[in-house]
Image (spheres, rainbow, N blue to C red):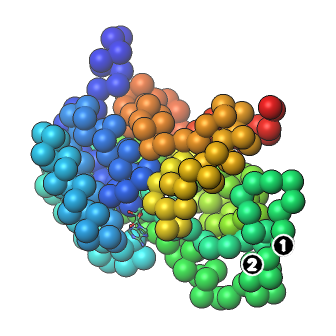
Amino acid sequence: MKIADLFNVAGYGVVITGGASGIGLGYAEALASNGARVTLLDVHPQRIEKETKRLQASGLDVRGQVVDVTDHGALDAAVDDAARTYGRLDVVFANAGIDPGVGFVGSWVGSERPRVPEGALENYADERWTRVIDVNLNGIFATVRAAARHMRPRKSGRIIVTTSLASSRIEPAIGAAYMAAKAGSLNFARTVALELAAYNITVNAIAPGYIVTNIGGGHAHDPVEQAAVSKMIPMHRVGFPDDMHGLALFLASPASGYITGQEIIVDGGWGLGTAD
Ligand SMILES: NC(=O)c1ccc[n+]([C@@H]2O[C@H](COP(=O)([O-])OP(=O)(O)OC[C@H]3O[C@@H](n4cnc5c(N)ncnc54)[C@H](O)[C@@H]3O)[C@@H](O)[C@H]2O)c1
């Protein structure tokens, strides 16, 4: 088989939640620039408008719709709408996610990571916990469910969940709900992968490490933070949404057709430890 056929996503109908920024936008660029028809669903109207226009102007088949993944009825309707528009739904990326705010230490790096009272468990507010679980776990559930409703009858589909290195490794600089939501998303993806395998639907997870995006107010754009984090990462650099292109295309395309229930980490080796 030729590479062009193995990775052929031309004409695919694709939905990406959180698609108007960062990692989701990276997925969109990877798929649309290879001929897929892509719908970006995002809660941020200005980003949807800006990025949809930009991608359309470069000749890509991209549409956008404002949807909050915590509104499951609106999410269902938007996925139905995309499937109706394309006449098929081949790939769904359940990707939208938010930053959980401060964890129990106050810095991403360093040998002395001071504890911060506002991040301590005893002070963890219910609403902060619930908000992260609502978006980062319940939103994944609702997106995958909406995808399955279209894919199971067709006995075909690819579902890709954005988890995080934090699904397996604790990051104490960010709130505990994030680790809980990401580990939950991973095990949910594995459960659904088992349920849907008999219907020729694969469900896999992409686990990014430290990727420069707008999450958490865009702190990762800070060159000082990037330089500090780069020292911890075995490849000595932070990641960018472009680093997600290859895996997104692989998991969406025929090349990965017999792979399901897997999480693939994209972190420059960060999860392995620190070498030099
Ligand atoms: N950036 C990283 O280092 C990193 C690392 C591991 C995992 N992730 C995960 O990657 C995913 C994408 O995050 P990102 O880093 O690209 O951040 P980002 O903020 O750049 O993009 C996320 C997008 O999701 C949208 N969004 C947020 N809440 C939403 C909601 N309720 N409904 C619909 N859309 C919503 C935002 O408007 C934004 O456009 C998240 O699940 C995040 O947890 C990011």
Of tags 1 and 2, the one toward the viewer is 1
Q: Give the percent coordinates (x, y) of residue 248.
A: 43, 38
Disc 1 packing (10 Å; few <14; some 14–19; many ≥20): some
Could you say which is closer to the camera, residue 33 or residue 145?
A: 33
Identify the amino acid type marked 2: Gly
Residue pictured at 20% horizontal, 63% vertical: 49
Residue pictured at 53% horizontal, 67% vertical: 216
Q: Which residue is mark 1?
A: 115
Q: Which residue is mark 2?
A: 119
Quarter holding residue 264? top right
Q: Are marks 1 and 2 in contact (CB under 8 Å)?
A: yes
Q: Give the percent coordinates (x, y) of residue 56.
A: 14, 47
Could you say which is closer to the camera, residue 69 or residue 189?
A: 69
Q: Give the percent coordinates (x, y) of residue 138.
A: 51, 71
Q: Provide the secondary structure element on which disc 1 rests.
A: loop
Q: Quadrant location of the C terminus? A: top right
